[in-house]
Amino acid sequence: MGVTIVGLCAIPPEKTSQQVIDVLVKRLTNLFADVVGVWSLDFEHYQANTDSLSSKNVVYSLAWSDNNTKYIMHNNDDGQIVPMESADEFTDNIKNYTLRKSLKAHGQTLLLGDFIVKLSSIVGGHTSLTDIVIEANYKPCSHVGVCWNLLHEFCKILTESYELSLPETPPLNILGDGTFDKSQTATQYADIFINHKKAVTKSL
């Protein structure tokens, strides 16, 4: 599955998210990237109705449309966002939670050699968010330490002239042997959705 990095590209005040995405898509297709599909990711943030559930007072649900993957995550005792050991523990008790936030990322998937790039705007209700999300995956690599910097440089080159925010270090829930799996991608998206603020509505 390779290693994936997820970051935010700021939208200049005079632009819309779709205009910035169009520029980035053009840069990629000029390098002979192919648009290979569309995708979406639904994010839901739940709060327990009581404080009796310890570290599971706050739960996050992330569901991808393109590969039917779903993660139920929470903050562990160290404050890290990690998958719940048993998703049924949440779904069986969902009546004890209140939905606090619901957001959706949606956009295009492009293939450039060994890189898979997803570009998406984010909406929640009738409000868009200030930035767009860039996901870059490098397929041949499975060890984070080998290719994290490569993914950094790839995203910086792609977004040249735009302000880019990327995680400096990989997610803390990397597997013990340094390999990467889908849950670390989910962790990065959850961090973006949890911490990012809504902006004044823009036409997408």
Image (tube, helix red, strand yellow):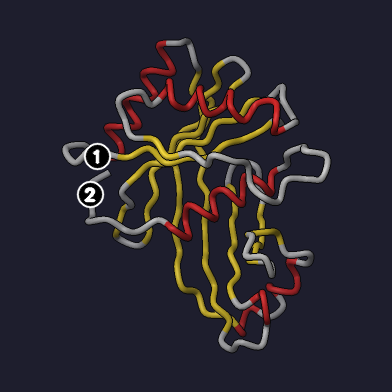
The numbered mark at residue 188 is: none
The secondary element bearing badge 2 is classed as loop
Q: Nearer the viewer, residue 31 or 50?
A: 50
**Quadrant where the N terminus is found in the figure:** top right
The residue under label 2 is which amino acid type?
Lys
State the residue position of label 1.
16
User: Which comes sooner in the sequence, label 1 or label 2?
Assistant: 1
Which percent across, then down, holds residue 94?
63, 78
Residue at image position (42%, 22%) is 158
Side of 13 where 121 appears, left or right: right
Residue at image position (51%, 22%) is 154
Up-down relation of residue 174 to residue 199 (above or below):
above
Sort mark 1 into few (<14), some (14-19) or many (20+) by Cα contacts within 10 Å: some
Sort mark 2 into few (<14), some (14-19) or many (20+) by Cα contacts within 10 Å: some
State the residue position of label 2.
202
**Quadrant where the C terminus is found in the figure:** top left
Residue at image position (33%, 52%) is 129
The secondary element bearing badge 1 is classed as loop
Up-down relation of residue 116 to residue 16 (above or below):
above
Please report contact status of discs 1 and 2: CB closer than 8 Å, yes or no. Answer: yes
Q: CA distance from mark 1 to mark 2?
A: 7 Å
